[in-house]
Amino acid sequence: MHRTSPLALAECRVAKSISDRISRSPDQTLYQRVDTIEAGWQIVQPILDLWSGEPPLAFYEAGSAGPGDADELIASEGRTWRAL
């Protein structure tokens, strides 16, 4: 006998509830179609895959001149950034 976890049942109920509300909505233009969502993920997923790889993203403080990695990148070609 296959048993479904209470969490899985709850997730199914929530998904069905959302689906029912969308399909009964008088204004279907408020919701994206599945093919539109899938097309968006085809564009976004490769970017997410690249960001999760090497080299890691360089983080820096808001309002600063940017990450030190940017300075090192152009310095390797004998260039510098203009002062802000």
Image: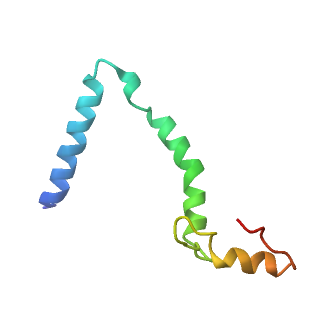
- Would residue 10 be visible to someone looking at this image? yes
Asked whether 82 or 49 is in front, the reply is: 82
Report which quarter residue 14 is drawn in: top left
Q: Nearer the viewer, residue 7 or 30?
A: 30
> Residue at coordinates 58% horizontally, 76% vertically from top-left?
56
Residue 63 against residue 28 in the figure, above or below: below
The N terminus, quarter of image = bottom left
Residue found 55% across the figure and 56% down from its top: 45
Nearest the eye: 13 or 61: 61
For the image, the number of numbered tags is 0
Percent across and percent down for residue 30 are 38, 27
- In the displayed image of the protein, which residue is found farthest to the right? 78
Q: Is residue 64 left or right of residue 9?
A: right
Indicate the position of residue 21 as horizontal and vertical percent values: 24, 30
Horizontally, residue 44 falls left or right of residue 74, namely: left
Residue at (65% x, 78% y) in the render = 68
Residue at 21% x, 51% y is 11
Q: Name the quarter where the C terminus is drawn.
A: bottom right
Outermost residue toward the top in this view: 26
